Image (cartoon, rainbow, N blue to C red):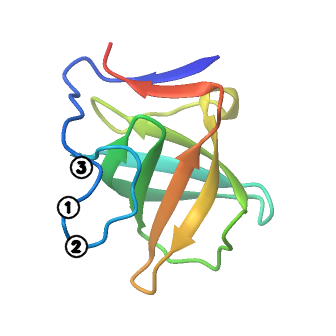
């Protein structure tokens, strides 16, 4: 099992913001650099987290690129500083939504936890 950790990350809140939010897990706002590998296109992308939950995250990518719901990606968060990482250090994720402004919603693989360490 992979674990994406950050010692001071605390995820709190409810599952509904009163505006019809369908999220089943609470979110925490988090601004960190992320590196994404898109296997289909065989390329790496850089972006930032907008928010995270225990098993998902919303990203803003620096270079919006065509992506599809259900597409598999690999992702890593640079917790302290921009990281140079090997591909085997990345966690599997699946796109669950895309937005016109370049934001991408990801569901982290079932064997990965986004947790405070």
**As rendered, which of 63 and 75 lies closer to the eye?**
75
**Distance from Cα at disc 3 to Cα at disc 2:** 23 Å
Q: Where 8 falls versus 24 (above or below)?
A: above
Give x and y (percent) for residue 83: 42, 34
Q: Are marks 1 and 3 in contact (CB under 8 Å)?
A: no
Which of disc 2 and disc 3 is earlier in sequence? 2
| Image quadrant in which the C terminus is located | top left
Q: Where 3 falls versus 103 (above or below)?
A: above
Give x and y (percent) for residue 5: 39, 22
Which of disc 3 and disc 1 is earlier in sequence? 1
Q: Are marks 2 and 1 in contact (CB under 8 Å)?
A: yes
Residue pointed to by mark 1: 17
Q: Residue at x 47, y 57 (%)?
A: 46
Q: Is residue 115 left or right of residue 94?
A: left
- Tell me where residue 81 sits by quadrant: top left
* Label 1 crowd (10 A; few <14 / some 14-19 / many >=20): few
Q: Which numbered disc, 3 or 2, marks the residue closer to the eye?
A: 2
Question: Disc 1 on helix, strand or loop?
Answer: loop
Question: Disc 3 on helix, strand or loop?
Answer: loop
Q: Is residue 116 left or right of residue 41?
A: left
Question: Disc 2 on helix, strand or loop?
Answer: loop
Tell me the number on the disc at residue 7. Answer: none
Residue pointed to by mark 2: 19
**Distance from Cα at disc 1 to Cα at disc 3:** 21 Å
Residue pointed to by mark 3: 31
Q: Where 26 falls versus 71 (above or below)?
A: above
**Distance from Cα at disc 2 to Cα at disc 1:** 5 Å
Q: Which numbered disc, 1 or 3, marks the residue closer to the eye?
A: 1
Q: Residue at x 23, y 28 (%)?
A: 9
């Amino acid at each position: 099992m992979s674990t994406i950790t950050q010692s001071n990350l605390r995820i709190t809140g409810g599952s509904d913001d009163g505006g019809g939010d369908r999220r089943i897990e609470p979110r925490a706002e988090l601004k960190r650099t992320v590196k994404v590998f898109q296997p289909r296109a065989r390329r790496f992308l850089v972006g930032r987290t907008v928010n995270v939950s225990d098993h998902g995250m919303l990203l803003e990518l620096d270079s919006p690129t065509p992506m599809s719901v259900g597409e598999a990606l690999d992702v890593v968060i640079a917790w302290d500083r921009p990281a140079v990482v090997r591909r085997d250090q990345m966690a599997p994720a699946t796109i669950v939504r895309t937005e016109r402004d370049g934001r991408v919603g990801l569901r982290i693989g079932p064997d990965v936890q986004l947790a405070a360490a």
